[in-house]
Image (tube, rainbow, N blue to C red):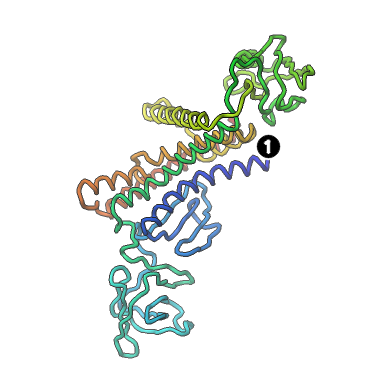
Amino acid sequence: MGMIGVVLSTVLVFFVIVTIHEWGHYFFAKRAGILVREFAIGFGPKLFSVKRGETRYTLRLIPAGGFVRMAGEDPELVEVQPGQTVAVKLKDNQITRIYLDRLDERTGTVRGEVERVDLERALSMNLLVEGESESFSVHPQALVVSRGKDTQIAPIDRHFGSKPVRKRAMAIFAGPMMNFILAFVLYAVYAQMVGMPVDNPDKLIIRSIESGMPAAGVDLRQGDIVDTVNGEKIGADLGKMIDIIGKSPGVPVEINVLRDGEPLSFQITPRANEEGAGKVGISASPPTRSATFGETIARAAELMKVSTEFIFESFKMLITGQFQFDDLGGPVRTANVTAEIAKKGIAQLTSWTALLSLYLGIFNLLPVPALDGSRLIFLGLEAVRRKPIDPNKESMVHFVGFAMLMLLMVAVTYNDILRLVRGE
């Protein structure tokens, strides 16, 4: 895979796992009848924005996640107040647009001073027009226009908080759920790609050659059969091959392969990795066969189980202090690792993407303020108490949690950059 392909693959991995997560929130929020104002990938300033129907889809500068902004979760951005002079456009005697500025330029409108307005429950507005009080009904999808932006009003029954707890919980849980589904599908695809080992294998086949590694400098090819390493027969013993190469960092090794039945010999000097073991940059495995449907499902389930155990073990080590701060990586390090894995081939990248998607789903379910897990806890408390938690208190908890997560993100990103500068 060339450098451009590696970069595009890395970007695509992040885009897919974040987008599928946010799409889960979006789909089940829309299904519950909640007005979704924005579907965003990334945070910070907008790079791209387009509005389709009721929702604005945006791509933002900082690629550290995304969000779905639902009506009622945050204070409305534009408010209409009594005493304010506005211009309204009518259709079938209903207000469809409310203009808050540049009123002299609004043609075909009724202009007046707001006497009374309710854009959430009654959907009505009283205007003082040329000394006369007039009453109008407001269309449930009416737009408030100000400073060149259109903001759709949100009747109370379109607010997130107006929906039953079970529907709100589903809209929140759907994000991680979609990550779990994506991980399972990708692991199934991976199982199909690598196949199942045959019974009683007798050889190792080179599956991929990593660019930039010593093996890439000779004429080794995918599909070559490993015969001997430093004169020792390998057969199907992958561990034996790794052991011989691993003990020879900086020392040339002779690798003999069979290609279409013809013997070929190559001298390759292993490069020491971080642990000092020699690596040449090839992956090999015994012969495989196509996996059946049942084997594919079983293998995907097994990989999900093993990966989940690995993720929770990592959390445990973090909590017990077995990890140091320098061991933590942020988006930069994750992108760097993803790029390295992309060089090894599409099968390895598929497996890595599945692991990242599973990790994102599990991480978001942790009971940490601002994450989905914390929001589900608040919904659970509301179900038990049979009344909602004070929205201001809940918002403050999530705000503090979000600020702490952003500080942590900045810290680990700084750590990532230092690591890159030091060449680690």
| Point 29% across, 80% down: residue | 115
**Amino acid type shown at disc 1:** Met
What residue occupies the far top of the structure in this picture?
232
Residue 237: % across, % down: 62, 14
Crowding at mark 1 (Cα within 10 Å: few <14, some 14-19, many 20+):
some
Residue 171: % across, % down: 37, 50
**Secondary structure of the residue carrying numbered label 1:** loop
| Point 39% across, 81% down: residue | 92
What residue occupies the far left of the structure in this picture?
385
231 relative to 294 in the view: left or right: right
402 relative to 414 in the view: left or right: left
In the rendered image, the vertical position of residue 48 relative to residue 223, given as above or below: below
Residue 382: % across, % down: 24, 49
In the rendered image, the vertical position of residue 152 relative to residue 335, given as above or below: below
169 relative to 420 in the view: left or right: left
User: The N terminus is located in which quarter?
Assistant: top right
360 relative to 5 in the view: left or right: left
In the rendered image, the vertical position of residue 37 relative to residue 299, given as above or below: below
What residue occupies the far bottom of the structure in this picture?
131
Residues 341 and 235: in front is 235
User: The C terminus is located in which quarter?
Assistant: top right
| Residue 368 image-quadrant placement | top left
Residue hosting label 1: 1
| Residue 134 image-quadrant placement | bottom left
Q: How many numbered markers are drawn?
A: 1
Residue 243: % across, % down: 61, 14
